[in-house]
Image: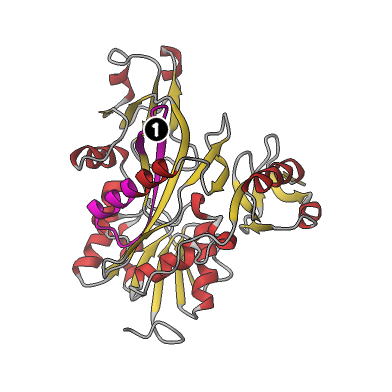
Amino acid sequence: MENYFSSDFRLGVLGGGQLGRMLLSETQKYDVFTVILDGAKNAPCAQICNEFHQGSLMDFQTVYDFGKKVDVLTIEIEHVNIEALKKLASEGLKIFPQPEVLEIIQHKGRQKDFFDTNGIPTAPYKRFEEVTELKNTMQFPFVWKSAQFGYDGTGVKVIRSIDDLQDLPDEPCITESLIPFKNELAVIVARNESGEIKTYPVVEMEFHPTANQVEYVLCPARIDDKVAHKAREIALQVADKLGIVGLLAVEMFQTKDDEILVNEVAPRTHNSGHYSIEASYTSQFEQHLRSILNLPLGNTDSKVAGIMVNLVGEEGFSGDVVYQGMEDILHIPGVTPHIYGKKHTRPFRKMGHVTIVNEDLVEARRVAELVKKTIRVVSK
């Protein structure tokens, strides 16, 4: 095994946002020298990584030059220059997740085609090169998704009438049938280069009604064991067909008939796994590090029930951030806040999260509601 720890080994990460920041807590724990590339000079990782480079993740030369500085390269966001990664891989650099996996996942049309080709259950869909093609071909309602660069609820809209098409960007997109579902679920899969593979428990996601962002993640999901088993098996199927090395977050719908449909996947650590920092034996961030370095995978079981509450900028506030109610929530047993290091807030911007752990999931959910009502992310 290569000596990754307290050595000259250099791990590169494309992206310096909150996911990278939480990964750094694990690379620091293992004393793995970590180099970050991000477009913003004040990115959440900038001041706490071993080495920081500012530059565009979509620029071929910037990504290629960065890759030449490291021994293994990973990502914390999938919107990166694939051609640069392919060239680096052809020259022998280990890149996880692999460029061919990222190429499929970063385009929702290719992603859905992959599900269809490999027999992975998903909602019926159509691909379009521009929005104008939709106007005479669709039956309402349906879900519109931008083919690329959607993130944190952007690039997704439920279309209920012709009027809803007016403000959509004229770009490649997909449409999906609007699925009536009981629950939105997610499963995180970890796989290392040796082929060892594990899944985390199924989690349940509760979304903000207008922002299309996750408000709460509950682990374990409040579903039947048979449904949970089916969800984990389908997540394993997706990871196996992709051949991914690293983490894969598989978002799903549980239909009214208890069928499981894959919504979309993310080839990285994910919002649905943040609860694992406090509630699991091995956090998703440590597991990602283990998987990309081909180390033995850790125990994915939960020690206690865990709920994550997203902290997002409150509507009507933009500017230097102020967290109100922080002292109040710190009085509550089992509550741990995580602040992402973003100095400026705006409506619905992800600024942090709070984890609530408890032996009793019902009590944890009650506390989560209290936390949500108590803490406010506003501006000066």
Image quarter for residue 263? top left
**Residue depicted at 64% across the width and 42% down the height:** 346
Give the magenta part as a residue range.
233-262
Query: Residue tagged by mark 1?
Result: 258
Q: Position of residue 302 (x, y in %)?
A: 53, 59
Q: Amino acid at mark 1?
A: Asp
Q: Is residue 12 magenta?
A: no
The percent coordinates of residue 353 (x first, y second) are 62, 52
Q: Position of residue 141 (x, y in %)?
A: 40, 17
Residue 103 lies, in percent from the top left, at 27, 50
- What residue is shown at x 25% (from left), y 54% (from top)? 240
Tell me which residue sits at (47%, 57%) in the image.
Answer: 39
Q: Is residue 197 above or below residue 318?
A: below
In the depicted view, which residue is nearer to us: 207 or 181? 181
Where's the N terminus, which quadrant? bottom left
- Residue 226 vs residue 355: left or right? left
> Residue at 63% of width from left, 38% of height from top?
347
